[in-house]
C-alpha cells in the first residue's frame, strides 16, 4: 500500500479565523486570516503556494454557505497558482477539495496546496432569517435540495429527523442516549477558545430544549457561523523540510449517494458513508481499534451515530449505547470524540473544523482539551456526499 497517492501527501499547516455569529469582518477578510495563518504555520510564504482549492465552489445557494471563490482568494492573497480546484456539493462530502489537493500533489502538479472553507451564514441570517433554509426565497430549487423541498423538508433537520426516528425504532435507541453527543461536544467546546458556544449543558438541559423536527431537539443541530478554516497540503518530500512534523495521510475513503443525490434504497438507519468506511480500511493495515481520537461529523447529532458505525468504530446499532453517559467519548475516554466541540458547539465550519481539530490533537496543541498520546485520528465529513481520512503522526 506504500504507493497509494495519499501517502505522497501531508498536512503541513493549519489556520482558522476567529469565529463570529455574526462576524464584523467580510468573508474575504476571514478567508485571508485563516489562509495566512495556515501558510505561516507551515513555515511557507504565499510565493511557495502553487495550488489552491476550496469547498464548495462559490455559490449563493443556502445564504452564505460559500461566499468566497478560489479566484478571488488567490488574487487577494497574492498566490500565483499553477493549479486550482473546487469541489461541488454533490462531490464526496466536504472533503472533496482535500481529496483534490491530495491528488494534485501526489501527481506532481504542485508542491503546496492551500485548501480553505469559508462560511458567512450568520451574516446571511442576520439579513434574512429564511436565507439558510433549503428553499430560501427562490421560486425554483435546484441541486440536492430539489429532492427534499417539494416535500416541505425546507431544513436539513427535517430530513435527518427521519433518520433519527428510524434509528430509534430499529435499535431501541433513545433521545437521552443521543443527547450525550451534544453534551460531550459542549463539554469540550468549553476548553476551546474559538468555539462559539462554551457554556456547559447537562443531559437535563438537552431534554428540556425545544423540539425542532421530532425527534431532533435544539441541541441536536449545528449552528451557523461566519469564519474560515484553511489547510496546507504538501507533497511528502517537500514536507520534511518544513516547520512542523508532517501529518501523514494514512488512508482516505469516499462515497456518493443518499437523498442528496436523489438516491434512496429504503433504509434510513445507515448512510452510504459505509462505503467510505470500507474504502478507508481497505487502504491501510491499521484497524478501527487503533484510532485514539475521532472527529466525527455532527451537522446533526444523529449523523455522529451513523458515522461511528460507518467507520466501524461501533457495530451497527451500537453507537447510541457507546456514547451514552459521555464517558467513553470523553477526553480521557476510550475514544475521545469531537475534542474541539464539533459543529454542535464549536460552530458550523462545515466539516473543515474537524480536520483542523485532528491536526491540533496530532500536533499536541490542544491545551486543556489535549488527548494524551494522540497519534492516529479518524476524521469524517458529510451528510450528502461522504469523505473520511485517517491522519497520523510518526
Image: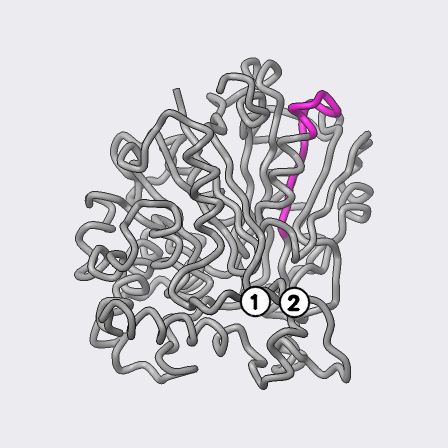
Residue 100 at least partly seen? yes
Percent position of residue 201, x then y: 27, 69
Q: Give 305 or 369, whichever is nearer the viewer.
A: 305
Which element is circle 2 on? helix
Kindly identify which residue carries mark 1: 259
Image quadrant in which the C terminus is located: top left
Tag in front: 2 or 1:
1
* Above or below for 132 versus 273: below
**Marks 2 and 1 close (CB-CB < 8 Å):** yes
* Above or below for 243 versus 150: above
Q: Give 53 or 126, whichever is nearer the viewer.
A: 53
Percent position of residue 160, x then y: 45, 71
The way the protein has been coloured in the rendering is one colour
Left or right: 215 in relation to 9: left
* Above or below for 345 versus 139: above
Query: Which numbered tag is attached to residue 218?
Result: none
Residue 125 at least partly seen? no
Which element is circle 1 on? helix
- Magenta residues (range): 104-117
Kindly identify which residue carries mark 2: 144
Quadrant of residue 377 within the rendered picture: top left
Within 10 Å of the Cα at label 2, are there few (<14), some (14-19), or many (20+) other Cα atoms? some
Q: Give 359 or 160, whichever is nearer the viewer.
A: 160
Within 10 Å of the Cα at label 1, are there few (<14), some (14-19), or many (20+) other Cα atoms? some
* Above or below for 51 versus 330: above
Residue at horizontal 48 percent and vertical 45 percent from the top? 276
Percent position of residue 248, x then y: 48, 25
Quadrant of residue 320 within the rendered picture: bottom left
Residue at horizontal 47 percent and vertical 52 percent from the top? 273
Residue at horizontal 57 percent and vertical 18 percent from the top? 236
Residue at horizontal 26 percent and vertical 36 percent from the top? 289
Amino acid at each position: 500500500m506504500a504507493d497509494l497517492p495519499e501517502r505522497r501527501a501531508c498536512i503541513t499547516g493549519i489556520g482558522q479565523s476567529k469565529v463570529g455569529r455574526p462576524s464584523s469582518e467580510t468573508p474575504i477578510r476571514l478567508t485571508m486570516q485563516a489562509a495566512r495563518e495556515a501558510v505561516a504555520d507551515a513555515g511557507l510564504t504565499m510565493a511557495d503556494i502553487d495550488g489552491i482549492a476550496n469547498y464548495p465552489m462559490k455559490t449563493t445557494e443556502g445564504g452564505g454557505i460559500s461566499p468566497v471563490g478560489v479566484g478571488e482568494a488567490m488574487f487577494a492573497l497574492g498566490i500565483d497558482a499553477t493549479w486550482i480546484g473546487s469541489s461541488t456539493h454533490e462531490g464526496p462530502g466536504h472533503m472533496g477539495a482535500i481529496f483534490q489537493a491530495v491528488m494534485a500533489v501526489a501527481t506532481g502538479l504542485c508542491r503546496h496546496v492551500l485548501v480553505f472553507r469559508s462560511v458567512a451564514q450568520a451574516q446571511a441570517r442576520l439579513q434574512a432569517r429564511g436565507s439558510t433554509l433549503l428553499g430560501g426565497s427562490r421560486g425554483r430549487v435546484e441541486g440536492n435540495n430539489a429532492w427534499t423541498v417539494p416535500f416541505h423538508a425546507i431544513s436539513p433537520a427535517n430530513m435527518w429527523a427521519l433518520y433519527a426516528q428510524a434509528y430509534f425504532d430499529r435499535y431501541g435507541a433513545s433521545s437521552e442516549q443521543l443527547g450525550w453527543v451534544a453534551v460531550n461536544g459542549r463539554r469540550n467546546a468549553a476548553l476551546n477558545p474559538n468555539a462559539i458556544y462554551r457554556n456547559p449543558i447537562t443531559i437535563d438541559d438537552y431534554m428540556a430544549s425545544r423540539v425542532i423536527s421530532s425527534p431532533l431537539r435544539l441541541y441536536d443541530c449545528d449552528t451557523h457561523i461566519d469564519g474560515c478554516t484553511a489547510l496546507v497540503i504538501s507533497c511528502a518530500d517537500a514536507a520534511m523540510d518544513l516547520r512542523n512534523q508532517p501529518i501523514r495521510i494514512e488512508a482516505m475513503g469516499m462515497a456518493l449517494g443518499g437523498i442528496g443525490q436523489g438516491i434512496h434504497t429504503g433504509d434510513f438507519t445507515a448512510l452510504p458513508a459505509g462505503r467510505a468506511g470500507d474504502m478507508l480500511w481497505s487502504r491501510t493495515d491499521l484497524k478501527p481499534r487503533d484510532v485514539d481520537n475521532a472527529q466525527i461529523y455532527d451537522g446533526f447529532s444523529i449523523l455522529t451515530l451513523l458515522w461511528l458505525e460507518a467507520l466501524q468504530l461501533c457495530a451497527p446499532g451500537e453507537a447510541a449505547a457507546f456514547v451514552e453517559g459521555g464517558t467513553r467519548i470523553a477526553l480521557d475516554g476510550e475514544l475521545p470524540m469531537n475534542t474541539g466541540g464539533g459543529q454542535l458547539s464549536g460552530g458550523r465550519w462545515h466539516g473543515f473544523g474537524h480536520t483542523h481539530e485532528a491536526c491540533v490533537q496530532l500536533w499536541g496543541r490542544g491545551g486543556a482539551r489535549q488527548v494524551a498520546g494522540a497519534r492516529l485520528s479518524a476524521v469524517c465529513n458529510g451528510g450528502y456526499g461522504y469523505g473520511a481520512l485517517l491522519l497520523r503522526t510518526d
